[in-house]
Image: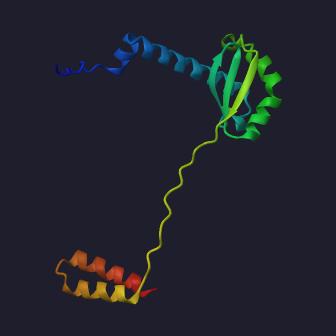
Amino acid sequence: MSFHPLDARRPGDLIRTNSTLKGLYAMAGAVERLQVLLNTLLEPAAREHCRVASMREGILRLIVTDSHWATRMRYQQKRLLRQLQAFNEFATVTKIHCKVQPVVVKKPPALTPMRKSAVAAETLTDTAEQVQDPKLKAALERLARHHKSA
């Protein structure tokens, strides 16, 4: 028995024909629309810290970056509910739940400083004297000068 891969199809065709992808795409569009509407009601400082996660069974779930913003959203919950219910998309919202999910920041790897020594400078200078290529010779001499300044 051999495997025969399906013919390649354009992403737009997949979204239109595959029911699972179609549902996911529709949900993503709905969440994006809810985020736009929510942003119109949030203060400018809060917009970057608050994202719509989902809306099911009358509960709007928000993801906030830290507990400070979760507390601020809880204090504004009644006002936000009143304003959100004016939109058709949010007409069934009865509660707002906030979940704290900190932003993951990847730290760059720590750079280990290069140790400089007079022996290394001397070795680089000796090597540069024996090299015929002018560009390589100049690069080795620059490295040697860098080590001599230590």
The residue closer to the viewer here, 106 or 125, is: 106
Colouring scheme, one of rainbow, by chain, secondary structure, one colour: rainbow
Q: Relative to residue 36, is residue 92 drawn left or right?
A: right
Q: Please state the horizontal and vertical placement of residue 111, each as a whole percent of the image.
A: 48, 66
Q: Please state the horizontal and vertical placement of residue 126, each as a whole percent of the image.
A: 26, 88
In this view, the residue farthest toward the front is 1
Q: Relative to residue 69, is residue 105 drawn left or right?
A: left
Residue 17, picture quadrant:
top left
Q: Say how many tags the image has.
A: 0
The residue lying at 40 percent from left, 16 percent from top is 15
The residue lying at 35 percent from left, 85 percent from top is 120
Residue 80, picture quadrant:
top right
The residue lying at 35 percent from left, 21 percent from top is 11
Residue 97, picture quadrant:
top right
Q: Relative to residue 11, is residue 67 drawn left or right?
A: right
The residue lying at 23 percent from left, 18 percent from top is 7
Question: Measured along the vertical axis of the image, is residue 35 above or below residue 18?
Answer: below
Q: Please state the horizontal and vertical placement of residue 90, each as a whole percent of the image.
A: 69, 14
Question: Measured along the vertical axis of the image, is residue 116 above or below residue 51?
Answer: below
* Quadrant in which the N terminus appears: top left
Q: Relative to residue 23, is residue 14 drawn left or right?
A: left
